[in-house]
Amino acid sequence: MEKKTKALIIGLSVACALLVVGLIGFFIYQHNYQKKQAEQNASLEQLAALDKQEMENEYAQFALQYDELKNSVKNDSLLTQLEKEQKRAEDLLQELRSVKSNDAREIARLKRELATVRQVLRTYIRQVDSLQRLNQTHTNERDAARAQYNEATMQISGLNAEKQSLSEKVAVAAQLDATGISISPLKKNGKAAKKTKDINRFAISFSITRNVTAQTGNRTIYVRLTKPGNEVVNASGSFNYENRSLTCSAQKTIEYTGQETRVTVYVPVNEYLSAGTYNAYIFTDGQMIGSGSMSMKK
């Protein structure tokens, strides 16, 4: 009896020991499992938070890119569309910021929206880039046309200047010249007068030189004879010279053929003449073509 009791006690002791060991092992396993599970959950939460932050950064970046696109667009219709899409990106960003990182369903939805926003943005980037290239092409064409116009204008100006210069040279070359100018005081009988009181008229003689570039035909010759004190002798008419009207002493119409032509113009005297220097100036075609002088004694 004692042996059976002793065996029973030993069996119970072993069973209790095994039960205790089993319970200890279970609790250790349960602790390790919970710890591992907590670590895994923490890692997943951290990854979800990082993923959410990355999505927020993308939304914010897309909103800024829309700003840049708007600054480079002048088309009102396209600008309105860009503003609409930018607001959509900003609204989705606000939604994302209000969602918890462990809300997998909302995060998944906003991630799909993010993909759509990205695709739409790429479409607008290509559209704006295409418009900018087109505008640049038009700008280049406009600049090329403007350069051609400026070059043509410069060529025309150069031709006009050359033509003007040539015309001036021709005008100078065509100007008549009076040479061999003589002033002869004459008496009433046509003989030379020695004294001023005997002068009845002056004979102003000169030669118009040969000029093949000058226009042929009739020419009106004006003679302006001045006495001492610069008063005009026999002031009897006027003509234009250098945008002003001058008084002449006499005038004569001749036919000029381009060859040397001898001319004599008579200036009558009906006034008092003093001793001194007398000057004769010859004009035609608005130009002074020669001058001469002589002195008279009283």
Image (cartoon, rainbow, N blue to C red):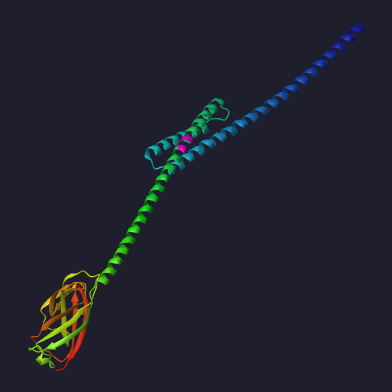
When the figure is inspected, residue 205 is found, relative to residue 10, above or below; the finding is: below
Residue at image location 32% in from the left, 64% down from the top? 162
**Quadrant in which residue 263 is drawn:** bottom left
Between residue 24 and residue 130, name the one nearer to us: 130
Residue at image location 46% in from the left, 42% down from the top? 68
Query: Residue 93: percent from the left, percent from the top?
Result: 50, 34
Query: Residue 144: percent from the left, percent from the top?
Result: 39, 50
When the figure is inspected, residue 120 is found, relative to residue 1, above or below; the finding is: below
When the figure is inspected, residue 205 is found, relative to residue 129, above or below; the finding is: below
Q: Main secondary structure of the magenta part?
A: helix
Task: Tell me the magenta residue range.
Answer: 122-126
Left or right: 62 in relation to 274: right
**Quadrant in which residue 104 is drawn:** top right
Between residue 192 and residue 136, name the one nearer to us: 192
Q: Quadrant of the N terminus?
A: top right
Between residue 98 and residue 160, name the one nearer to us: 160
